[in-house]
């Protein structure tokens, strides 16, 4: 009888210890993810400041906004120069793509600019600005694979935001389960 009580007592301690270790590990992982998210947001805020401090890039954004609204009556003379904007955005996409702690909202920080570049007709014209160029367009050019991936990831994240809440929650749960399995 004493052996049964001792066994039950030891099993209870062991179970409590395992549960405590599991909870401690979960809190540790949550704290690490919080710090990683903070680091990601600091990176994105710094890049946003760089964009805001660059008048040429801001001019490209302004022109692309006009183009998107059908008001691009006076395009700049050099589309190649304007491609500095997707060139600026491309390393951000690479950072987000290969950072395991990236969260969906991180893509929203530059979502507007990425979509403006992707949707632009003018931006991807040949350097003389007269004809479309397969060698220049991000979707077909061998020079823009990282930007192409950024556009795809951005569009995928925006599409998920359009899902009904239940499906969005299912996607989020599946994504987190995959992250836990990879860790």
Image: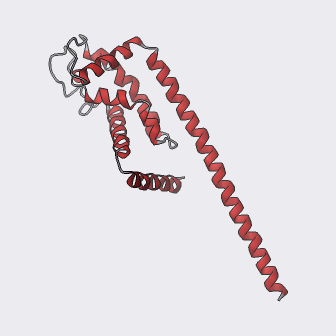
* Vertical relation: 7 (above or below) 147: below
Of residue 99 and residue 56, the one placed in the foreground of this image is 56
The quadrant of the picture occupied by the N terminus is: bottom right
Residue 115: x percent and y percent? 32, 31
User: Which residue shows up at 45% across the image and 17% down it?
Assistant: 52
Of residue 138 and residue 65, the one placed in the foreground of this image is 65
The quadrant in which residue 79 appears is top left
| Residue 143 visible at all | no
User: Which residue shows up at 66% across the image and 54% down it?
Assistant: 25
- Residue at the outermost right position: 2
Residue 126: x percent and y percent? 20, 19
- Residue at the outermost bottom position: 1
- Residue at the outermost left position: 131
| Residue 135 visible at all | yes
Residue 67: x percent and y percent? 24, 21
User: Which residue shows up at 66% across the image and 49% down it?
Assistant: 28
User: Which residue shows up at 25% across the image and 11% down it?
Assistant: 76
Of residue 152 and residue 48, the one placed in the foreground of this image is 48
How does the figure colour the protein chain or chains?
A: secondary structure
Residue 15: x percent and y percent? 71, 70
Is residue 8 toward the left or the right of residue 128 in the image? right
Is residue 113 toward the left or the right of residue 142 in the image? right
* Vertical relation: 45 (above or below) 11: above
* Vertical relation: 164 (above or below) 75: below
Count of labels in the image: 0
């Amino acid at each position: 009888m004493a052996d049964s009580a001792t066994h039950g007592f030891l099993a209870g301690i062991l179970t409590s210890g395992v549960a405590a270790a599991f909870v401690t590990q979960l809190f540790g992982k949550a704290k690490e993810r919080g710090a990683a998210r903070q680091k990601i947001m600091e990176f994105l805020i710094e890049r946003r400041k760089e964009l805001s401090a660059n008048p040429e890039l801001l001019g490209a954004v302004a022109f692309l906004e006009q183009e998107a609204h059908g008001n691009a009556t006076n395009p700049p003379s050099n589309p190649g120069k304007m491609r500095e904007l997707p060139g600026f955005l491309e390393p951000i996409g690479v950072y987000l793509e290969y950072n395991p702690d990236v969260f969906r909202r991180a893509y929203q920080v530059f979502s507007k600019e990425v979509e403006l570049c992707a949707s632009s007709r003018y931006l991807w014209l040949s350097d003389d600005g007269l004809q479309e160029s397969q060698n220049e367009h991000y979707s077909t050019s061998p020079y823009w694979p990282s930007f192409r991936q950024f556009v795809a990831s951005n569009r995928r994240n925006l599409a998920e935001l359009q899902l009904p809440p239940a499906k969005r929650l299912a996607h989020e749960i599946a994504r987190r389960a995959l992250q836990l399995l990879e860790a």
